């Protein structure tokens, strides 16, 4: 039940609120214990042997968590017939594998299987992680190859993976994914690796169960398809996406007409302190004395650039790129190529993860309830990452100012959005955000806030902007958007928040910002 609940939580965070999880187990006490731990209507418990189970409808994904012995092989043999997209197995109890129970495709009877049975015994050597890990990889590679070659394999590809051993000694995974069309073969009739077909480096490496000997005629055909696909993607990305008409319920329309200042508990949500851990210079001897308000005094003598790309960019605008250390300039150039290496590096740090956790808690406990006020209970969509902004004191307006705009001017935004602006320092005057009181009035006033206060406003319809920061203090803020899921929109709203198509899936987005669903 823990797995099922976590799976549903993940799916719902991706906006898949109607998906279900079915647990199949032949152990009545396990099923009873699981059913007592959850009352979620989207979780179904079924008592059955797997080889006797017939699902009422196909599954998108079949997952086997530590299926005992040959049960893994039964799943590999049977699941492709009723699984639409993927199969994930974490095998267990290797010593219980038997040809009679379904493992015969890779474990021969008698003397022919003696060597493999010796390898199986090594799988259970928990006192020797190196030996057991190698043995499990060998066994699962044989399993994957047998599954791909079997009748049930068809247009499936199987390969081994693994996760960190600290979670379980049985940390090897077999992953299967379905090809959307018959698998092309090499001159010997062996199925070809999809990565080799498209001219890419195979992610499975030496463990790949498919052939890499791509015939020239096939290579040329896929090279042509690749160019055609690139052209279609380019055309699609350059074609504006028509946003569906979203009905805004009366309660939300009334809510968005009032700009409100809300307070939040800075002890419960210490955003300033957590942001300082990755914004300020590293604490060494002697201390730099820099605070968030004095980030414009950030020392330029460090070999490594500051992690946040927004701070690095602002320092470049303030001092000129030529004044920055070479490594900083190189990082700016690398980020400008669209590789987002700085963002990725920042988001992998423990300091940023702590900051994001506090942000997510703030969204769940303060922002989402405020955006739903008057509309009853229900979920909401929100930006996955907050937008961090740094406007240094003295930073020129031509390079450091957000132009006068409203979110409706940009593709992908919807009228049900509620904007939140959260400064991490005291703001006012030229060191703040200017917002008009109602759409089209143009009566811009600077927002006066202290740390611990935030502004909730209709940034979709009301224009807002900043000006030259002449206050002598740097402004650090985050902003985000929340879209109530209840009270209007339904499936149309969910579709509107799906970004431009990427492969077969559409990522949840609010404008250009990746989004999550919050219950």
Image: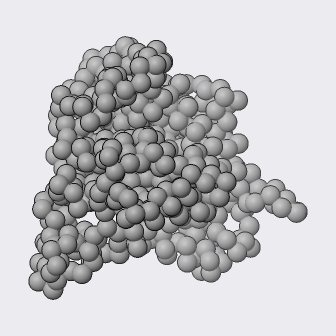
Decide which of 180, 347 is in the foreground and name it.
180
Whether residue 202 is situated above or below residue 165 in the rendered picture: below
x and y percentages locating residue 424 in the rendered image? 63, 41
How did the renderer colour the structure? one colour
Instruction: Please state which of residues 71 and 4 is positioned toward the viewer in this rendering.
Output: 71
Q: Residue at x 47, y 49 (%)?
A: 94
Q: Is residue 315 above or below residue 453?
A: below
Whether residue 477 appears in this view of the structure is no
Please tell me how many numbered marks the rendered image carries.
0
Image point (32%, 23%), residue name: 46
Residue displayed at 72% across by 71% down: 302
In which quadrant is the C terminus drawn? top left
The single residue placed furthest to the bottom in the displayed view is 216
Screen quadrant of the N terminus? top left
User: Of 336 and 91, which appears nearest the observer?
Assistant: 91
Judged from this view, the residue extending furthest toward the front is: 110
Q: Does residue 260 appear in the picture of this structure? A: yes
Image-based side of 299 in relation to 117, left or right: right
**Viewer-side residue, 291 vs 449:** 291
Identify the residue at image location x=43%, y=68%: 339
Residue 128 placement (x, y as % from top left): 65, 58
Q: Is residue 168 above or below residue 54?
A: below
Q: Is residue 240 left or right of residue 460?
A: left
């Amino acid at each position: 039940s823990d797995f099922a609940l976590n799976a549903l939580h993940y799916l719902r965070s991706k906006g898949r609120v109607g998906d279900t999880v079915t647990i199949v187990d032949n152990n009545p006490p396990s099923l009873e214990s699981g059913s007592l731990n959850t009352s979620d209507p989207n979780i179904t418990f079924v008592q059955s042997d797997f080889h006797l189970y017939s699902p009422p409808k196909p599954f998108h994904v079949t997952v086997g968590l530590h299926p005992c012995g040959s049960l893994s092989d039964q799943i590999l043999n049977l699941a492709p017939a009723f699984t639409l997209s993927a199969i994930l197995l974490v095998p267990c109890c290797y010593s219980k594998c038997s040809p009679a129970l379904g493992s015969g495709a890779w474990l021969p009877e008698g003397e022919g299987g003696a060597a493999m049975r010796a390898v199986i015994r090594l799988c259970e050597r928990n006192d020797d992680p190196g030996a057991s890990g190698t043995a499990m990889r060998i066994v699962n590679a044989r399993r994957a190859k047998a599954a791909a070659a079997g009748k049930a394999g068809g247009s499936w590809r199987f390969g081994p993976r693994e996760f960190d051993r600290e979670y379980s000694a049985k940390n090897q995974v077999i992953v299967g994914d379905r090809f959307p069309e018959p698998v092309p073969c090499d001159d010997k009739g062996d199925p070809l690796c999809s990565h080799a077909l498209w001219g890419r480096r195979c992610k499975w490496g030496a463990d790949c169960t498919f052939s890499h000997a791509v015939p020239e005629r096939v290579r040329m055909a896929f090279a042509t398809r690749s160019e055609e696909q690139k052209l279609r993607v380019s055309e699609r990305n350059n074609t504006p996406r028509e946003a569906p008409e979203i009905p805004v319920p009366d309660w939300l329309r009334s809510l968005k007409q009032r700009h409100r200042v809300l307070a939040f508990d800075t002890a419960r949500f210490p955003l300033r302190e957590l942001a300082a851990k990755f914004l300020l210079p590293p604490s060494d001897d002697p201390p730099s004395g820099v605070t968030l308000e004095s980030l414009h005094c950030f020392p330029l003598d460090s070999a490594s650039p500051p992690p946040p790309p927004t701070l690095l960019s602002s320092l470049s605008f303030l001092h000129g790129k030529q004044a920055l250390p070479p490594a900083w300039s190189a990082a700016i150039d690398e980020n400008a190529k669209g590789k987002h290496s700085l963002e990725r590096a920042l988001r992998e740090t423990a300091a940023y993860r702590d900051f994001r956790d506090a942000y997510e808690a703030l969204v769940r406990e303060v922002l989402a309830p405020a955006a739903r006020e008057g509309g009853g209970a229900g979920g909401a969509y929100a930006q996955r990452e907050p937008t961090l902004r740094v406007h240094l004191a003295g930073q020129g307006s031509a390079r450091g100012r957000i132009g006068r705009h409203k979110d409706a001017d940009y593709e992908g935004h919807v009228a049900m959005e509620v904007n939140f602006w959260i400064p991490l320092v005291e703001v006012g005057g030229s060191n703040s955000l200017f917002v008009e009181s109602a759409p089209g009035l143009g009566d811009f006033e600077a927002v006066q806030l202290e740390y611990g206060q935030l502004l909730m406003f209709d940034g979709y319809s009301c224009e807002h902007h900043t000006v030259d920061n002449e206050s002598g203090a740097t402004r650090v803020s985050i902003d985000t958007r929340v879209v109530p899921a209840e009270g209007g929109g339904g499936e149309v709203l969910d579709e509107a928040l799906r970004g431009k198509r990427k492969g077969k899936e559409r990522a949840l987005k609010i404008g250009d910002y990746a989004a999550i669903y919050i219950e």
